[in-house]
Image (tube, coloured by chain):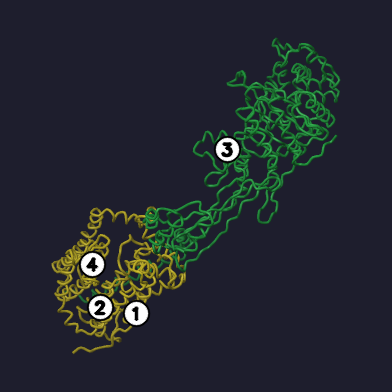
Chain colours: A yellow, B green
Amino acid sequence: MKTQYKSDYIILIVVLLLVTIGLVFVYSASMYNAQVTYNNRYFFLSKQAVGALVGVVALVFCWKIPLERVKKLWVVSVVLSAVLLVLVFVPGIGIENYGANRWIGFGSFSLQPSELAKFSYVLFCAVFMSRRDMKKFGNCLVVIAVGVAFCALIIAEPNMSITMCMAMIMMVMLFVGGARWKHLFLMLFPIVLAVPLLILLEPYRMLRLLAFLDPWASPKGEGYQLIQSLYALGGGGWFGRGLFNSIQKYRFLPFSESDFVFAIIGEETGLVGCLIVFSLYALLVIRGVRIAVNCNNRFCCFLSCGITSVIAVQSLLNFAVVTGSIPPTGLPLPFISYGGTSLVVFMAAVGLLLNISKNISSTNIGGFLWII
Amino acid sequence: MVDFYTSKKRLLSLFVVAIFLLSVIFLRLGYIQIIWGKQLQSKASEQWQRDLPVKAYRGDIVDTNGVVLATTKTCYTLYVRPKSVVDSEKTAQILSGVLQLDYTKVLQKVTKRGVSEVTIARQLDNSVVEKIRNENLPGVYLSAEGIRSYTYGNYLSQVLGFVSVDGVGQTGIEAYYDKYLQGINGQVLTDTDLVGKELEEGQMSYIPAIDGLTVTLTIDSTIQMIVENVLKLAMYQQNPISCRCIVTDVTTGEILAMASNPGVDLNNLPRDNLQELMQYSKNTLVTDIYEPGSTFKVLTAAACLEEYKNGNPKAFGPQHIFNSAGTRLIDGSKISCWTKHANGKHSNQNLSDALNTSCNPIFTDIALSLGKDVMYKYLQAFGYGKASGIDFAGEQGGLLVPQSAVTNGDLARIGFGQTIAVTALQLCMATGAAVNGGLLMKPYLVKEISDPTTGKVVQRFSPTVVNRAVSPETSSQIAQMLARVVKEGGGKNAYIEGYQVGGKTGTAQKFVDGKLAQGKYVSSFVGFFPASSPKYLVLMIVDEPQGQSYGSIVAAPYAGLIFQQIIDYKNIAPLE
């Protein structure tokens, strides 16, 4: 019997704060559009609130479930994710939206399998890498094979952003897992080659790439989304227009409640509000890294590392897109953006993180992370 | 097996990278929000608001007594923003009912997609607008606009000019004083969403329009109406291609009436027939030139008397008896009088007699005797060869043979008004200068520009003396001689007992394509009263009258009619 320590309640508080911020800004960003489109200003808020409630249940469940059982669930999880990713293409079950098959659904219930797949993959990696010697190239190939399979299914939807996210997580897992540098470089090649290939397959990606460099070259086309995002942020200044006072939410900024909700946060609360949100994410990542670094067993270390990197990668990508630092791509901001699946899955993952944190003594902190 | 410590080291290094990236993005964010923000805001503000122009009221044009000649009537344009319409069927039903439009067509417009605004009806008046306002239909908007309206559509049309469909002055006073009349448009800014739907909590800012100024003409609408009516009569009786008339106040240079017939109806312009529009809306009294003929002899006579007074030995005194011959031979070319000097006609005449009979050879003698230097000095002093400077676009300066190139033959003909082309306005001002005491006045059409709301005069135009043409004594002599022309000579048909009307007739053959056109005359009469202290001057021009062509018969009677009616209107008592 292992010693049980106190869970990392800072993580819990930070996540609950982020989810609350999410509810407030999903409402603020969507109320006008919801009123006009559905004649109900709470349309998106209520769906997000349901997601948050389910998320809390999932979080508590993952927090309390014995980690050994989680470890055994990896096969189920990977297979389930793969099946769901395939179901996206099955007519009647898959839902097409904006020209992409990213959802499956029955009635009013819908789900985005790619959100689940990221964490299934992390779980798989944690289990596999904890058992194998990752210095061996063969073992690396297994991790890559599963990752590429997921990536292939996701890019087929198509969903470039989650694919990129997935690929990055794969690299992070291999890197942390201990793969040799030369193997890592070997793998980097096909990824570097894949980028021009993907652009060749879908020329609109090149347009987007150019639009990011000078959005005003096509203000009504490719550059529109970024321009609107910049208008929102630019309206924020130091302290923002005030809560619910966004102008850009009046249908100027598309996806203002989902992928671009951070732009609305920036508009309504200014640089100061953005700093607070950044700090919350940074704190969350710090606590996640702290757990991973202090774990005594490899599985827990890799799992907490994986979960933390998904959060870190995805939020960084989202911030970068919204600020026009990288080409625009649609990726939800964890815990805040509108989207039930994403919210539930991320909260469940945080549950696992809390679960792992029970194994760590607050006095047993090594490295420079002792300050935190 | 991998060293566990390596994994942790690698994880920590990734963490450092992540925090670094987050810091970079934060700096970028700070740049966007704090430094770039203002610029982004101003770019974005264009899309946040829709602006509706508030048209400035175009200023009125009024006559010298304040009678409104051109004004702006408010009418409304009704348009719909389909996205803001709540109940499209009900809206279409009410609109089609009130506007008497086809229901299905209105419904089509009300439900039209992909447009922010659809115009339903234009030029609606207040009563209709009131009905629609009372219905309080969401998504239905009215915008007021001004339609130019002219009190007397047919009168003064060439002077007033017209405006374009957008209300910009195109010709005449409307064009010349456009910047004063126009005013400054304002606007209503409304907060809207992406597709132009107004926001409930949105703000509305209103920048009021500044109305155009009132332009007061020197024109007296009553005299203008008198003239227009007389022109109609002349058109009917003489059947010419056109009749034109100017009435001026010789003491000030004010234009009291200026009319051409045929003209255009400003309230119903032939906008689709550009040629007709340009032809009849042109103020030819200012923009076109003609050969004046005998009316020009006033100048020659005045020059002669003034030079005589100043002791020029080549000038003839008022008592000088001229050669009675009917022709002169100048450099081998023969110049004849308009009538044969047989049976004692035109014999033993002095200057006054010569004006009475309009004897061409005598004016030839004067012009040649004075010489080209003196003649050109007087042409200049009387304002010929250059534009008068009237406040009207497109004025011409007339045609003079250059002084260096003028031959004796030319000079001789100039003496009785040929080989020279002038505008009707120039002839008026020159004749005025000859009789008003000797001052050439600058003609003007606008005497005041004022603010309609405060009544404050923004700009006032006063009589301007261009130069002295002749001495008061000479002027008075000329006025008396011209009074005799009307009493006994060629101007008899303009005579009014007791009012000392003076004047001179003119009949000039028209040039068509550089050649004298047989049977085509411009008959004219320039007259004024009272001769002892001239005030009103009338130039009446009848272009190509059918039948009789002498100015004395074709033009003088109408000038007389105008004088008589001005006397009645102004209630002027007889002098004798």
Evaluate if marks 2 and 1 touch, with contact meaning CB atoms under 8 Å apart: no
In the rendering, at what x and y percent does residue B454 appear? 68, 56
Task: Label 4, secondary structure: give it.
Answer: strand
User: As drawn, is A122 to the left or to the right of A244?
Assistant: left
- Please give the residue where the numbered disc 1 appears in the rendered image: A14
The reply to the same-chain question for discs 3 and 2 is no
Q: Amino acid at mark 4?
A: Trp
Q: Is residue A72 above or below residue B261?
A: below
Q: CA distance from mark 3 to mark 1?
A: 82 Å
Estimate how packed mark 4 is, as few (under 14), some (14 to 19) or many (20 or more) residues with alpha carbons within 10 Å: many
- Please give the residue where the numbered disc 3 appears in the rendered image: B264
Task: Label 3, secondary structure: give it.
Answer: loop
Q: Residue drawn 20% across and 62% down?
A: A187
Q: Earlier in the sequence, mark 1 or mark 4?
A: 1
The reply to the same-chain question for discs 2 and 1 is yes
**The N terminus of chain B: image quadrant:** bottom left
User: As drawn, is B373 to the left or to the right of B421?
Assistant: right
Observer able to see residue A219: no
Task: Label 1, secondary structure: give it.
Answer: helix
- Please give the residue where the numbered disc 2 appears in the rendered image: A348
User: As drawn, is B431 to the left or to the right of A259?
Assistant: right
Task: Label 2, secondary structure: give it.
Answer: helix
Of badges 3 and 2, nearer the viewer stands 3
Q: Amino acid at mark 3?
A: Val
Q: CA distance from mark 4 to mark 3?
A: 72 Å
Q: CA distance from mark 2 to mark 1?
A: 14 Å
- Please give the residue where the numbered disc 4 appears in the rendered image: A103
Of badges 4 and 2, nearer the viewer stands 4
In the rendering, at what x and y percent does residue B92 appear? 40, 58
Q: CA distance from mark 4 to mark 2?
A: 19 Å
